[in-house]
Image (cartoon, rainbow, N blue to C red):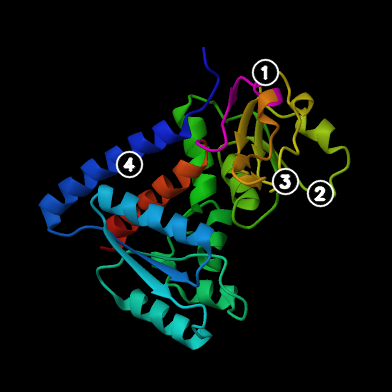
Amino acid sequence: MSNLIDGKQIAKEIRAELKKEVAELKEKTGKIPGLAVVLVGEDPASATYVKMKGKACEEAGFLSRTHRLSENTTQTELLDLVKQLNEDDEIHGILVQLPLPDGLDEQEVLYTIDPEKDVDGFHPFNVGRLMTGDPSFVPCTPRGVIELLDRSGIEIKGKRAVVVGRSNIVGKPAALLLLQRHATVTICHSRTQDLPGVVREADIVVAAVGRPEMIKGDWIKKGAVVIDVGVNRVGEKKLVGDVAFDEAKEVASLITPVPGGVGPMTIAMLLQNTLESFKTHG
């Protein structure tokens, strides 16, 4: 029996559920959820990701709008666009693709997005609500991590969970979500003493440190569940996670592959957040 958690398949099921719900809402209200994505500059990885988001939106029956701006766009022009989208009744979610080109203030842009349309969950208002246990929008990747655990039948309550990585986008919110589900959570980082020893205590490992195959198989407790958020390019074409997959899969009870694990869930959760915004404010 395979011990792989198939994020691609789980995301496909979620998107089919969303498509069905959107069709029902459209029949009832005559309206559909709308997502606006803002892409500044020509970063190839960002452009590919934005294209995938647009396609996923359209397949699920959402309104999808992509605003492509040149890398010479000024801070004022970008903020003006965000303010226009804040006022647009057809748009229920706004996402500004990061990273922005040099010279643009990411924080000011993210803080300008209406918290009620902040489907990435990065606005301090939404970060604060997550911290107090009353989230409105949960960042998409951490939400995807919890969804993978739930849909794989993993009991979170009472488990020892170790999150390797403390970013605002993945590590910290993932730790908060696990804590809310009654796990005992440890957050690790590059300065953690005896990192392998700490990881070996975990029933659930969430790897989000951004270092290729840093977490070795002998760091994983037998029977632990491993969620690998990392996506690292090695050489020309190979993508690997933060976990040494071939070693870890021999001891883990369940493990996500890279690619095909957490990645597809991020877009599915973006659609879920946009639909929830539509249902609340649409």
Which range is magenta?
247-260
Question: Disc 4 and disc 3: Cα gap in Å?
Answer: 30 Å
Task: Tell me which label, 1 or 3, sits earlier in the chain.
Answer: 3
Which of discs 2 and 3 lies nearer the camera? The answer is 3
Q: Which residue is mark 4?
A: 15
The front one of 138 and 256 is 256
Question: Disc 4 and disc 2: Cα gap in Å?
Answer: 36 Å
Question: Disc 2 and disc 3: Cα gap in Å?
Answer: 10 Å
Query: Amino acid under label 2?
Result: Ser
Circle 4/circle 2 CB separation < 8 Å: no
Which of discs 4 and 1 lies nearer the camera? The answer is 1
**In screen coordinates, is 135 left or right of 128?**
left
Query: Amino acid under label 4?
Result: Arg
Could you tell me residue 128's position as x and y percent? 56, 62
Could you tell me residue 66's position as x and y percent? 35, 67
Helix, strand or loop for disc 3? loop
Question: Disc 1 and disc 3: Cα gap in Å?
Answer: 21 Å
Q: Which residue is mark 3?
A: 211
